[in-house]
Amino acid sequence: MPYKGGSRLSGERASKLGHLDIIQSDLVNELIDQFESYDPEIVETDAKWEKIDLSEEPLRLIFAVDGSKQTVRSDLPPYKELSFIKTTLLRLDQYALDKLDPDAPHPMALRDIMADAAMYHATVLPLKGVRVKGKNNYDAVRQIIFESLNDHSLNREPYNTLKWLAYELWTGQPKKSPSFSCPHCSEEVSGLPYNTDEGECEHCNGHLFLSDMIGFHLEMGEDVAPDSVSTAYMLIHETLLLFTGIRHFWEKKKYKVLNNALFLKDGPLTLRSQYSKLVIPIRNFIEFAKVQGVEIHIAGQEKTGAFVDHLEIIAKYAPAGSFYAPSNDYIRKEVQHRPERAEPYGFRTNYGNKLFVKVDNYHYLVMSIPTGNYVDTKSAADLFGLKKILATLPSILSHRHECALIPIELANGVASLSSYPSAAILKIFADI
């Protein structure tokens, strides 16, 4: 590896002549020839595509969530870092969407749809070099996260959803929160008492927030928090916003509204690492709703990643108006290219199973659909509310971007914090 340049001396440059030794290899030249040649082949795959049933009525009420973040850094040492985060929940009505031109929607029509249709949350986390009076950075971030989840501009609804999930309040049975590592002594806390906001560690008597259960502190040091903490906060808040709408209709017993609503999330239905503690309560709720006979339609759309790359290849040979729900065996062999594992894909982290959809010759999507309790997808019947979700997709396709959905596209427009000029503007305010 070359030496980097500093303030006094220039950096070391890579050797241009070093390539000569490489291209003298017969194996290297053979691989280069194959890389540069274009000989399209039909990709053999075990995917068994099924026809989309369009006899179902499309869902008329649509909620979409998305989030964005920008981390800004000061120009001079000692460097300071702040991360700005914004999340959005957008409500749309199919009747209004039907009037939009999917190729070039009129700005005024978009304005009318967006009026009073979006709620958003914004916060900022100090990651490095920012002092909060009387606290180190570790405790300051913990408290900011707790207070941000209690955002009074949203009537504390996302935080109430966190409690609803953590204590599984829909069952009506007293239950502790999931266990978690104490942010003070690192011992395992058995859980906070039923329906409480704060408590004490049973080992060191340290003060605990319910938000500590999620596990943000496990990534932080005493004086520095990595950028991944702000990413995790954004993903958690997106999930809480998504289930806030579901909780609202559930508690109001508006089951008919739930049966006719689609809840869309930008990204897969997954929470990784320590943040996966919420996955089990979410699965438990979906299973509870299935037993109660209340159909809830939740879907996440992936825009990038291994599954999107794989679908881009196999979708060419799939019939239009079809879908395929890959099993764990298919994911392991065809997408991940990994040996068999002790646990199936997504067993601890996913609350939705993968679904490949080819709506037409121009739109193919990687979706996630919940199953309730974890199952290795063997049949489309495992995916909760699948028929109505698939029947809704053709009416919400966008032609402005590749394989886009209008609700997610609009939610992204509200939540997005672009690198320029937004990041520059945020930096100006951060430097004051």
Image: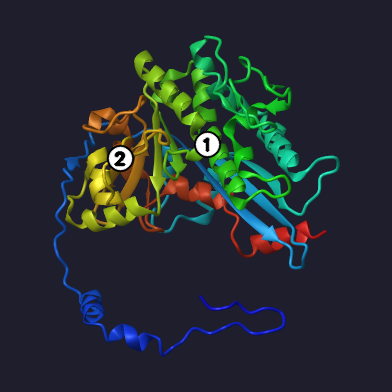
Residue type of the residue flagged with mark 2: Arg
Read off the residue under disc 1.
274
Q: For this view, does 240 lie left or right of residue 323?
A: right
Specify the quadrant of the image occupied by residue 374. Answer: top left
Q: Residue at x 47, y 50 (%)?
A: 409
Nearer to us: label 2 or label 1: 2
Looking at the rendered structure, the number of numbered marks drawn on it comes to 2
10 Å crowding of disc 2: few (<14), some (14-19), many (20+): few
- Which of pointers 2 and 1 lies earlier in the amino acid sequence? 1
Residue 120 image-quadrant placement? top right
Q: Specify the label residue 341 is tagged with.
A: 2
Q: Residues within 10 Å of mark 1 (few under 14, many from 20)?
A: some
User: Does 418 sit above or below residue 240?
Assistant: below
Q: CA distance from mark 2 to mark 1?
A: 20 Å
Q: Quadrant of the C terminus?
A: bottom right
* Residue 340 horizontal side relative to residue 278, left or right: left
